[in-house]
Image (cartoon, coloured by chain):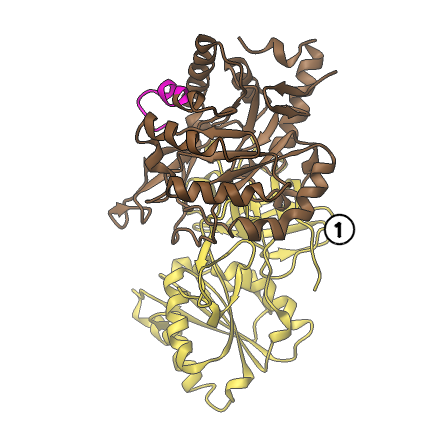
Amino acid sequence: MSFNVKKGLFDFKNPICTASGTFGYGEEFDDFFDVSSLGAITIKGTTLNIKDGNPPPRIYETPAGIMNSVGLANIGINAAVKKYSKFFEKIKKNGTKIIINLNAGSINDFKDIVEVANSYDIFDYYEINVSCPNVKKGGDSFSKSPELVKELINDIKPIANKPIITKLSPNVSDIKEYAKAAIEAGTDAISLINTLKGLAVDIKKRKPFFHNKVAGVSGPAIKPIALYMVYQVKELLHEMDIDIPILGMGGIMDYKDALEFLIAGADIVCIGTANFVNPKSSYNILNNLQKYLIENNLKLSDLSF
Amino acid sequence: MLVNKKVDFISKILKNKMLQKNLYLIELSKPEDIHFKSGQFVNLRIDNNTHDPLLRRPFSIFDVQKKSFQILYQVKGKGTSILSIQDVGDELAVLGPLGNGFDMEKGSKINFFIAGGIGLASLIYTAKELKTNNEGQNILLYGARDINYLLKEKFYKNIFDKTYYALDVINDKKLTKQYHNGSVISLLNNLYNNEYSNYKKEDFSCFICGPDPMMKAFIVWNNNNELNSQLSLESFMGCGFKACLGCAVKVKSGGYKYVCHDGPVFNWNELEL
């Protein structure tokens, strides 16, 4: 039975992917399961140069969710390729696609990192983070208005030699406006949602828990919000009569959650916070989803509206 | 060095009992081929069927047998409180072994095990292991808020050659002879400069585990004394295997290291706490 997802410029052997910042570079999960069983992995948010990230504390637990203020800690694109290309090649041989999540603080810096990414064949798709809420001067500014998103994608799209995915922020008043802006600028896919902005308070110290005050909320707690946004973007695609893939994410813990996203309009689902709770989550979801479809004699394309 | 593969396994609760107020001991089954080094830890799913608490909790290893291991824990928050009511026979997901563990080659003539509160948990197994290949004396310096927070000695009999206690608060004046009133680091300073003043600097090794302020105080003290010392850190943690980058700790060489992957044991002079 066919389990692959073919849409636009995308061709995944199955609809299971991982969410950026929750799966390291993939190799961290090699002890736990065969990562090359997944349709794709999204590697952690990458910048042109090494970034130390935020001072601790960086993580906090809230009912059915977590909050993070990691601050895009990463080793830089060139070092990442050098360190992990063997692993990437290994899983690519089995048909797993590699998505690199790209981050920069200005349009020019975005162009620079896209040019560098272009020089490596190892990446299959670029995910453009217009929404990371953790870095004061980072992607956040592009989510201030749909026009900024449009301008950014407009400038990146012509120079990118791989299909681009625009990752949207949920911290906006109307997600459709942002999705529309990205689509009009020529994005090849939409991924959503990034983390929601939140505040954790330390009552012992009587002050905000994180140095940056604001942190990104993820996990099951945000799932209904993510589902609604995915649904809205799917509606928009119908309205615009455009058929590009939606990568849906936000609190997917098991195959039933994944089904909900697929029914709400996602073509591909990305597993995020669940990777921390159970490192085999994405693998289990893949197998259980497949089993569900077989048992119910359904195709993936039967799920979405 | 032995590279141990991380495994996510389902473990059966063999025992889960209160030893004394707030302190619990849980015994969990493990496959025979999973070996724990002293100072390593596991990430435990408190309850497999709930999203609250969502994340696993890191615990150091208190003792190990062939087919089981034990964790000593203090009920502090929601996670440990739920753990304390889990029944014998229930199953929990266990991820481990995680982290680097103590370098056991570094034992000396005098091995100071310096524990703050529940930090004692990882030092007991370490002291036991050290005894197997080191002839030196194992001396425990054990600090806690007050006498009720000290694990009773009957639970770790014959592991240390000598034990000294430090209590922040002593209500019963009769106890001041037996218990140092003050921090465990001030106790260390007293012992080092009095009872153990005949030894050379090179004769000491320190194995330390406790809350951050104690670690900071130790580093300040050791800046002057420079004893060979390994610190086992506690941290908030998302995953336990360097995927979330949540457990960052600042290092002197610049940037951050990660407690779950580069630690939890660090050399005292690499940290910028």
Please say whether residue A252 is visible from this viewpoint: yes
Position of residue A262 measured from the top left corner of the image (x, y, whole percent): 55, 17
Position of residue A254 measured from the top left corner of the image (x, y, whole percent): 57, 25
Where residue A279 sits, quadrant-wise, is top right
Taking the spot 64% from the left edge, 20% from the top edge, the residue there is: A5
Give, as a three-letter code, the residue at label 1: Asp
Q: Specify the segment rendered in magenta.
A: A170-180
- Helix, strand or loop at label 1? It is loop
Q: Is residue B140 magenta?
A: no
Where residue A98 sits, quadrant-wise, is top right
Position of residue A155 measured from the top left corner of the image (x, y, whole percent): 43, 33
Q: Colour of chain B?
A: yellow
Q: Is residue A178 magenta?
A: yes
The front one of A99 and B153 is A99
Residue extending farthest to the left is: A206
On-image quarter of the N terminus of chain B: bottom right
Residue extending farthest to the front is: A158
Position of residue A180 in the picture relative to residue A40 (left or right): left
Chain shown in brown: A
Chain hosting mark 1: B
Please say whether residue B179 is visible from this viewpoint: no
Taking the spot 40% from the left edge, 78% from the top edge, the residue there is: B223
Position of residue B47 in the picture relative to residue B128 (left or right): left
Residue under numbered circle 1: B33
